[in-house]
Image (cartoon, rainbow, N blue to C red):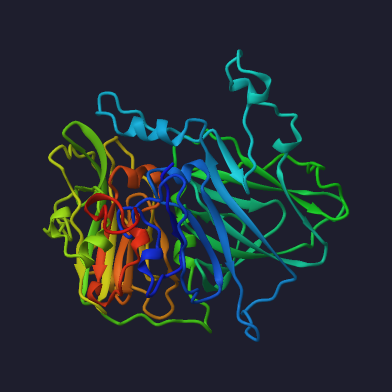
Amino acid sequence: MESDKHLFNLLQRETPWSDGTEGVTQCPILPGETFKYQFKVDRPGTYLYHAHYGMQRTAGLYGLIRVSVRDGDSEPFAYDYDRSIILNDWYHNSTYEQATGLSLPSTNFIWVGEPQSLLIHGKGKFNCSSTVASSPSWVCNESNPECSPFVITVIPGKTYRLRIASLTALSALSFEIEGHNMTVVEADGHYVEPFVVKNLYIYSGETYSVLIKVDQDPSRNYWMTTNVVSRRPPTAPTGLAILNYYPNHPRRSPPTPPALGPIWNDTEPRLAQSQAIKSHHSYIHTPPPTSDRVMVFLNTQNTIDGYRRWSVNNVSFNLPHTPYLVALKLNLHHVFEQTTPPTGYDFKNYDIYSKHNNSNATSSNAIYRLQFNATIDIILQNANTMNINDSETHPWHLHGHDFWVLGHGKGKFDIYKDPRQYNLVNPIMKNTVPLHPYGWTALRFKADNPGVWAFHCHIESHFYMGMGVVFEEGIERVGSLPSSIMGCGDARGLGRP
């Protein structure tokens, strides 16, 4: 099975070939091969890694990386114990079956559908009555101890840091702990001005640290739950885990029913959380006051030659067979299109609330060439899909950089008025951010990391179907490439055997 790994959030300065993105910075790792990633860790925080070949992340190839502060340094919050929780959705169909369905013409197109389960740190729930009657007993056995919920045992009176990460293939999630508020203190490796939530809304690719105080009735345990939001109607059962108050038995179920979660289509609290996240007052990295270049990316669907695709500015992205990093360093200009993709759309006349035909779309593997050290603004604009009254949530992730989140808004972005409302005082820096239905999100970053970097929707099927772009900056500053990243496309024979 071919694979590669994206080492999430870690900026890979001076080592762009360790970003782990097939088609962008390296060739896939072939079956039986060993690939060694070497890189500098530049700051403490909570990070992720996952496969970045096809849709392999959906199959479970992912994990969490915790980077501690240097000896002698401290963090702007205190806690007694540190625990990790990875949230995910789970499908019974293989990634190959899903990818095949997405690659069929529109007349036979098979959408991946909603997940069968939600997992909390690898454990989930499924209704065994939904299985085929002829299935062997081992296919679905609810009484198997391995099918019991994930448990975190806590000591009353203590404060816990929970590092919560989402690597869902599709779902936007809410997460809550029965009877306990959560104080958000970190997001994507950056310290947050603390704020309290009951439900933590979290999107694929994001990491958060929250603090909880173990101060409730110690004679019982409490549910930790996750539910799908922003997809209609959610069909996956609530993901369950147990907060076990020591010395209660860890398998002791809480006496109350699990929370049903917030209303799936209530966008307001999700938008409010996005707008509430600010940099901690002692760790503010002030953004440049202005930008050198503005790019507006319309998010929607299209159809190309009878195939359904996702797109940016009505152009669907295709990865080349030769990684961009290799092609650019070796001057293999023929392996990808040399035109410049569109940096905007007809925002004056485009109705973001209407279903558009979008059958006149195109695909491309062209990239955006950025001036090194330039300040770049990106406006993500959401719109209606090719279904009536439908606009989906898109978590966008930028490789090789952190960006300032300047603002979120409803409706169509006004390029003349909305920039006046940007937060230039204490915006949070992140690498993954949600774009809410029928809304916009504004980002700013410095093109100061030599290399080639993907920027894409972190929903597996959306990126697979073309919802992404690639940036190049300072390629002439990149050192000699290791042979281990070559061996495919026109780089075949230039590196590994």
Q: Which quadrant of the rendered structure holds the N terminus?
A: top left
Residue 226 seen: yes
Q: Residue visible at 12% across and 59% down?
A: 338
In the image, is 401 to the left or to the right of 184? left
Relative to 451, say whether 28 is above or below: above
Residue 415 seen: no
Instruction: Give the number of callouts.
Output: 0
Residue 142 x/y as whole percent: 71, 29
Q: Residue visible at 84% across and 49% down?
A: 220
Farthest-out residue, front: 497
Relative to 123, say whether 246 is above or below: below
Q: In front here: 86 or 273? A: 86
Q: In front here: 117 or 58? A: 58
Residue 447 x/y as whole percent: 29, 74
Q: Residue visible at 11% across and 58% down?
A: 339
Residue 127 x/y as whole percent: 63, 27
Q: Residue 198's image quarter?
A: bottom right
